[in-house]
Image (cartoon, grey):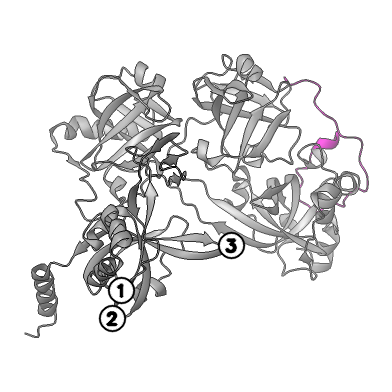
Amino acid sequence: MADIAQAQEQITQGALDAIFNDPERLEMNYPVPVCQCVQIKTLASNQENAPERYRLVLSDVFNFVQCMLATQANHVVHDGKLKRGSIVRLKQFQANCVKGKRILIILDIEVIEGLGEFDKIGEPVALTVREEGNIKPSNSTITGAGFYGKPSSNNTEPLKQESSAPPRKVPTSSSSHTNIYPIEGLSPYAHKWTIKARVTKKSDIRTWQKQNSEGKLFSVNLLDDSGEIKATGFNDQCDQLYEIFQEGSVYYVSSPCKVQLAKKQYSTLSNDYELVFDKDTAVEKAEDQESAPQIRYSFSTIADVQNVEKDSVIDVIGVLKDVSECTQITSKTTQKSFDKRELSIVDDSCYMIRITIWGKTAITFDASPESVVALKGCKVGDYGGRSLSLLASGSLCVDPDIAEAHKLKGWYDSQGRRENFATHTSLVAAGSEGGRRSDLKTISQIRDENLGMSESGDYFSLKATIIYIKQDNPSYPACRTEGCNKKINDMGDGSWRCEKCDVSHPCPEYRYILSLNVTDHTGLLWLNCFDDVGRIIMGMDANKLMELKENDPPASEKLFEMANCKVYTFKVRAKMDTYQDQQRVRYQIISATAINYVQEANKLSEVIKLYRIE
């Protein structure tokens, strides 16, 4: 076992600065950097069955940086080799930018076990990274000595760092594929790479038309052992590559290929990046079709869909109970026609759910009832109860060869065929909005629990008394076209115009937009509400109220006074909002119900009984 002086001698001091700020110096002076691991942390995952992820902090005595261990390198942790204080060789890595922060992605790492573990060596400080424009980016992933025409050493004993190395050898043809790059390591800073991945989803060709341009595109989802990424081809690349890619097949994809931030509104994948095919992107079908993983699911049971946020995207698997005919609907806004088909599936949670599939998937669907279907990328809806809709970026597989499908088929054959299945009732009728639990809260609990601070917002019920309603601007002039409700403009000639619908109306349809102050025994809170709730609170529609304000102001003021001091049970959504560059929590009333005093008295009676001493 070496002492701390020997360990410090092996560390390539200054290597981290070279990695991020001077790749040319890195290649010359630090072909295989050696650092100390001063921290290991397991990262929490919000997906079931996702591989474990580890964040490291590495030090070269002078500096330290945050690092992410690629899943392909997790074995050094699982085998107990990598520990806090270990000395390690970085055999393959990529300087990266994740969510605006510089981070080192470790693709291949070797623990020098002969040196042992030590407390932090030296007094390293956080690495200062120069502005992007001042950095000369390296042309590819740095892979240690193996990239310099020498085999990487497998010897676990300490080695002196070499001061120089021969020029880097680059593969001369795409067929060599000697340096396969993991998908999770791709970033805008990676320039020369080849990935080997399976196509898990291939879209139809879609066209677009704008004022000055038109075109077409398609996309594929690519999966390897480290992760999944979306890749899109436009126009010429669409023509060249669409027929090459086939769902389920494995391909080599090699740069040049643009790596850009993912447009999350068009993808269900968790990757922060996506690919755009270039005219010179090389795509080659792999001879080995077995090495890349099959499609990766994270299934939710049908019963659990009740507790999932509305508009969330999930994966489900179930036995097909019913299939409707394929029908067409026409969009009110674009007048385009869409093909759709309704499926009903069940699972061993003894629930059934309706799923809508679209387009080519709906037209070609021909699975028989009692088949097992797995769906990846379903959007949760709540129209007349919980339902699902398969997104364009999602996929459907009939009778997949996976353990979950075999288990479900066995359950259905043995007992599921005879079960009576429950369905998700309308959440409005059930007293919950949007599939979220709306627990009864006091105003002090709302503030103490910081409701509304989460990214998706929070839902709760509140029993409170209205003490004040703002009377200025209680409504807005809305478009009279059914389903529009956008604000319209007074043209000054007796007409009102809606820019969205491109139509004029002789008069608007006024709709409530109220701001009210409520109280309970713990505090005060400002709430906002729209037309449906406003009608309940004011006892009339907004058109009549605005007529009163215009023709009989005292009567309208009296109406506001009468609306005060009334008690309601409000269902409220709390969500962070930005107003005049200031962030605040906005409390939006979803529904308001007048207090039923008989029911309230019975509830109190039951609570009192709980405290009865026998």
- Contact, mark 2 vs mark 3 (Cβ under 8 Å): no
Q: Position of residue 265 (x, y in %)?
A: 51, 40
Residue 291 seen in the figure: no
Quadrant containing the C terminus is bottom left
Q: Find residue 544 and report its image quarter.
A: bottom left
* Viewer-nearest residue: 526 or 299: 526
Q: Find residue 240 and report its image quarter.
A: top right
Q: Secondary structure at mark 3?
A: loop
Q: Which residues are magenta?
A: 147-175
Q: Position of residue 453 (x, y in %)?
A: 46, 64
- Contact, mark 2 vs mark 1 (Cβ under 8 Å): yes
Q: Nearer the viewer, mark 2 or mark 1?
A: 2
Q: Nearer the viewer, mark 3 or mark 1?
A: 3
Q: Which residue is label 1 attached to?
A: 442
What residue type is disc 1 on?
Thr
- Contact, mark 3 vs mark 1 (Cβ under 8 Å): no
What residue type is disc 2 on?
His
Q: Which residue is label 2 attached to?
A: 521
Give the residue at x 16% y 67%: 595
Q: Which residue is label 3 attached to?
A: 581
